[in-house]
Image (cartoon, rainbow, N blue to C red):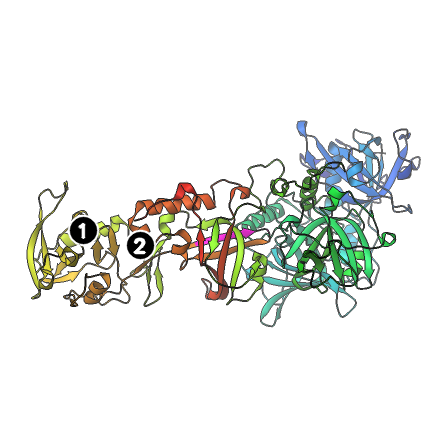
Amino acid sequence: MRITSPCQFETKRGKTNRDAMPRRVMLQGAGPGDKVPAHLTSVPVSLIGTDTDCSDKTVKGKVVRKGPLVSLASHSFILKAVIQEEDSSQSASINVVLIGELAEEFSRAVNQGDVVVVSGFSVGRSPTVHKDGLHPFNLLLSGDTACVYVSPPPPPAPDDPSTSMANQRSSALPAQVSRMTEAPKYSRLGDLKAGSVVNVYGVVVFFKQPFMSRGTDLCSTLKITDQSDQKIACTVFSKKLEDHPQIFGVGDIVRLHNVKVTDFKNSVTLMNTFRFSVLAFDGAEGDPLEPRTSSRSFHLDQEDRRTVEELRTWAASQGLLLPTTPLCAAQPKDYFDLTCQLLAKAPMDTTCTLLRVWDGTRCAHTQLKVIVEPSVVDGPTSFSAARERLIADVLVYDNHVESARQLKPGDFLRIYNLRAIPMSSKAPPPASCRSEEGGRDHLGFHLHGGTAFSRGIRVLPENSPAVRELKRVMEAVPQEDGDDFSEMNDSLLLEVWSTPPQSPEAEAMEVSTGVCVSERSCAHDVGPLSLSEVKRLHPGGVHHVRVQLRSYEPVRLHQALKLYCSKCSSIWYTPRPPGLRQDVPDDELVASLFSEASKDPEPCCPPPWALSGQVLVPGESVASPGRSLSVLLSTDFLCEDTKRELIFLAGATLEETCQLAAGYQHVVPVRSSGGHMTLLDLSAPFLLRGRKRSYGCKRCSEAAVREPAFVEGAERIDEKLIAEALGVEPLQFVLLMKMKLQDATGVLDVFLWRGAESFFGVAAEDVAANQEAQDGIRQLMAFLCPAGGSTAQRPWMDLCLTAYQGEDDEGRPQTCYQIHHSTVTRPASTHSNPA
């Protein structure tokens, strides 16, 4: 059963000589002695049991599933695979568990789709028989007597266009040799050149399930992106469904080999060519790195794994992963993706099929319950009252009917672009179905015909992370019919749904029925939309959404305070290009400007309309005890009414100016330039009013010190009058933040700017001058987006969004969103008086 001729193979411990260690995974036909010994007899899978005599017996089957190699203690390994008899009319399948060096060799040398013959096995009971529905016993292979013979794949037909001489030559080589070829090179999507044939990685941002083209091939389309931020379309034509990318959702990662770069309508497009192959991976961080493919052989090394992990991290930071929506979060008029299990199905007519599905949660709305004849139902015809409350009836139409015919009860599905349709009792459902709850409004779930917006149905494998998560939710539901959980709080199930196993601190997208902490003040007559619906609409509209705050920028809230010029419509912000843009200047910068001006050697000559004098610095200034400062006062404001006081202050530091501003209504800092009075650089405030400071726009101002024009009858002078006299265009304090909102259908980046004062309930000017107002905003943001808190801890907000056309940093058009007419109800701990 073992080969005695020398043969080297690669292991994790380096190259090992065949004489030093026996090879127990052998490719039939690769050398003499690699064939199954003639004295061994084959046993059908159906006859396997604990009483089976395993000596000199073999089991033959096709590898239909190959699990990952798992490292155990003491440097050992374990691997689980499923083989299926090809010659059996029942196609019986059985689990094969390999342990030790044999598992390591099997992982390296055997591919999914290979035909293997196993010998030297023992039989044990399968602990997963109730979950996977396979054979009640396992084949266990370990020790020196266990052996696996691998049959080479049959040569392709001569007329098969995918046949290549290289493939034919490699099929005659041991699997170990084919893995040691040179690793392929990959191109970034931003570096593609028309006419070249390339290999690429990318994150899926759009896809369509395979559909019949106008010819004889199936066609699938997808759009991918990577860190170069280029979105590239890709089209795959193939007669075989298994040759198409196995995309489960937006955010998945694909590896495409041998795709041709073409220029179609001035856009770069990829198309499959000769020797095309594709791998797909789940896009969520932390998910197992198991490729989805029907390829018999593929190269996947450490560099590939690193690339996939980098794309996962980048996609998460860009918010590219779109979660599916559980039934309990479905809202009327929503389009959403649903991960569920099929319980039963029934044909309604030639263009409609009923699917009865559940996901472990209960829809919050009264549902359409469709009545069909029990004789046409495939699957259970009735369920307990408790289970019936969790079941949704989905009506599938047109081209999806054929896909529905292929489904089997028990399959795990992902239904894409499912629509929740509110159906009033005044507008009854179609004649092919009727509701059990007549006279009441109800919600129906329809999958319309066509392939727009990825619309379709896909069966998910049981080992996919989405199915494992779904099973975890379902296992939290009581199984006994006597358990009445009609009043079960769905938020408890959603905690299970949203908390990854063995990772309670990880944050995941959750849907909650919690209390909303905001209100809209607008009068728009529009219905609520999900974020996925908002993103599909064109700019120029107003939308109402219910969302949570996922993150926000800037994290340091004082950086959200900006200066805005209404004349040139510019927001002055950090970072500061030379000589133009600026954030609200901090005290260090302003103090340096005042200090420089106070050192002017020339005295300030007063203009004819002003009187000069001296003022004693009040307070207990350490820097200038008892120092007198030069002031100038307009003759028009020499009166007892302190509301009209206006002084021009020269030679003072920032500390001294602030002390005087506490006792004078308006203080204008000036300096001497050539013996004449001028304003300070406009990076410094041109006016101080108590604790408030006023700044001017450098672009729009023509600063000069002139006498303010006093208007008879005016009760007081104000900032506007002074700014006009000085030729200064005043800047307005505004709050500017970028927020990432989330709901069960996705995420959306929005701006909070013009509606910020309404949102926070405080003026931006008060925030600039009042520490209590700043603390109030900080506490409110901590309430909306608690640091380290789970999604369940974040409150929900009803917001009004305005969509408009803008540009990105490179001048390309993009749809932008702003929050308007929305006010957050402050929690008790955040109440403050900003006055």
Looking at the picture, tell me which residue is in the foreground, 783 or 298.
783
Vertically, is 285 above or below 706? above
Q: Is residue 10 left or right of residue 146?
A: left
- From this viewpoint, which residue is outermost toward the front? 439
The segment highlighted magenta reads 738-744
Q: Position of residue 101 (x, y in %)?
A: 74, 33
Is 539 magenta? The answer is: no
- For residue 469, which quarter of the picture? top right
Three-letter code for the amino acid on which mark 1 is drawn: Ala
Mark nearer the N terminus (2 vs 1): 1
Classify mark 1: helix, strand or loop.
helix
Q: Mark on residue 661?
A: 1
Residue at x 8%, y 57% (from the top left corner): 602
**Residue 165 seen in this snapshot:** no
Instruction: Locate residue 90, reporting x and y percent.
Output: 90, 46
Q: Residue furthest bottom?
A: 265
